[in-house]
Image (cartoon, helix red, strand yellow):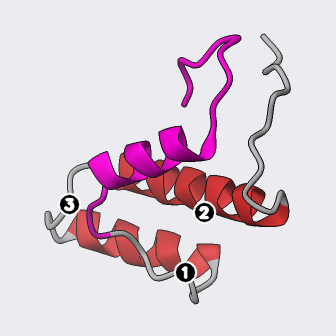
Amino acid sequence: MRFAQSYTINLDHVRAALNKTARPIPAAERSLGECVRDLLAAARRSEVSDAHARLTEATERELFTQAIRQAGGHRFTGRRRP
């Protein structure tokens, strides 16, 4: 998603990206603070070495999922600011 530049990203692109990167992430029902706390605790126990990447991925996934839902599944054709 970050490398889309001026290309249009549609629902199929997002779904494909989400399917490719799917891995265990914090549950959506929990607050952001709870997710951060649990990821940091897992990192302290050496269970994960990529807490930042996991949180970023989960946040982006939720952001795009909700954006698509709110747009009624319609693609966004706006341009990203540099």
Taking the image as shown, residue 50 lies to the left or right of residue 26, namely left
For mark 2, what is the residue? Answer: 62
Whole-angstrom CA distance, mark 2 to mark 3, is 21 Å
The stretch of residues the image draws in magenta is: 1-24
Tell me the kind of residue under disc 1: Ala
Q: Position of residue 39 (x, y in %)?
A: 37, 69
Q: Disc 2 to disc 1, how far (Cα)?
A: 8 Å
User: Quarter of the image holding residue 68?
Assistant: bottom right
Q: In the image, what residue type sits under mark 2? A: Glu
Residue 50 falls left or right of residue 14: left
Return the residue at label 1. Answer: 28
Which residue is at a point 54% across and 80% down the rendered structure image?
A: 28
Is residue 17 depicted above or below 3 in this figure?
A: below
Marks 2/1 in contact by CB < 8 Å: the verdict is yes
Q: Nearer the viewer, mark 2 or mark 3?
A: 2
Closer to viewer: mark 3 or mark 1 = 1
